[in-house]
């Protein structure tokens, strides 16, 4: 089996000193690596009645649309401010180095709709937590969360104990 972690490039001191960035672009350009990643993200949620896959800007779009196709359902983007044209709901949340805001169209999720949230990486969990709040505020039911990479040493998973959280690649240390 292809070892996906070998397709992830470490970039030291990006976006700031002391951070080791997990660059997925080598994995994305590898056809077998990309296909395997999508299958491993989708498989735990097959047969769970997922109606929508929801991905956070921007790398969540890459895996989200592929997962939506694999699960035969729709895709909804969660965007950064001023990118969505229709009525939207927004949330501002804390990051380790400031604040950020995310938005979703108010009509993107129908009350009770079964949603799978996806992103490329789970670190401290701030972005995914904001995404979960947006979806639940619109009445969506979160079936699970799928991430390609989990940095488990940052303990982001603790925020999502009430959800079925699946990660494909787990880094236990930096």
Image (tube, rainbow, N blue to C red):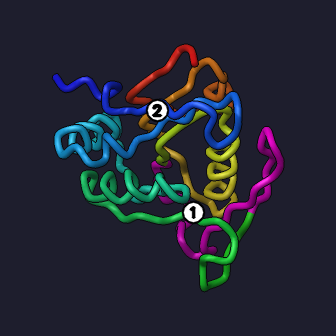
Where 168 falls versus 33 (above or below)? above
Q: Which residue is mark 2?
A: 149
Which residue appears farthest toward the top when viewing the image? 172
Q: Which residue is mark 1?
A: 78
* Residue 107 colored in magenta in the image: yes
Stretch in magenta: 91-117
- Answer with the quarter of the image where residue 27 lies: top left
Quadrant for the N terminus in the image:
top left
Quadrant for the C terminus in the image:
top right
Label 2: how many Cα within 10 Å (few below 14, some 14–19, many 20+): many
Percent position of residue 98, x then y = 83, 48
Q: What's the distance in space between the residues labelled 1 and 2, CA to CA?
A: 19 Å
**Residue occupying image coordinates x 61% and y 85%:** 86
**Residue occupying image coordinates x 42% and y 36%:** 148
Percent position of residue 16, x then y = 70, 39
| Closer-to-camera residue (117/7) | 7
Label 1: how many Cα within 10 Å (few below 14, some 14–19, many 20+): many
- Of callouts 1 and 2, the N-terminal one: 1
**Residue occupying image coordinates x 66% and y 23%:** 154
| Closer-to-camera residue (63/86) | 63
Q: Is residue 135 left or right of residue 32?
A: right
Percent position of residue 25, x then y = 37, 46
* Residue 34 colored in magenta in the image: no
**Residue occupying image coordinates x 54% and y 59%:** 57
């Amino acid at each position: 089996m292809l070892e996906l972690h070998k397709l992830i490039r470490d970039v030291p001191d990006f976006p700031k000193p002391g951070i080791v960035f997990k660059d997925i672009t080598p994995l994305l350009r590898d056809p077998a690596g990309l296909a395997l990643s999508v299958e491993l993200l989708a498989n735990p949620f097959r047969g769970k009645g997922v109606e929508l896959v929801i991905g956070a800007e921007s790398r969540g779009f890459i895996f989200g649309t592929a997962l939506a196709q694999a699960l035969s359902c729709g895709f909804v983007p969660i965007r950064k401010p001023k990118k969505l044209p229709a009525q939207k709901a927004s949330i501002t949340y804390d990051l380790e180095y400031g604040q950020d805001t995310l938005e979703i169209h108010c009509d993107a999720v129908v009350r009770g709709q079964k949603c799978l949230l996806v992103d490329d990486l789970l670190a401290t969990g701030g972005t995914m937590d904001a995404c979960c709040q947006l979806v639940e505020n619109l009445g969506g039911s979160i079936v699970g969360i799928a991430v390609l990479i989990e940095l488990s040493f940052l303990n982001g998973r603790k925020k999502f104990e009430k959800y079925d959280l699946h990660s494909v690649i787990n880094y236990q240390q930096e």
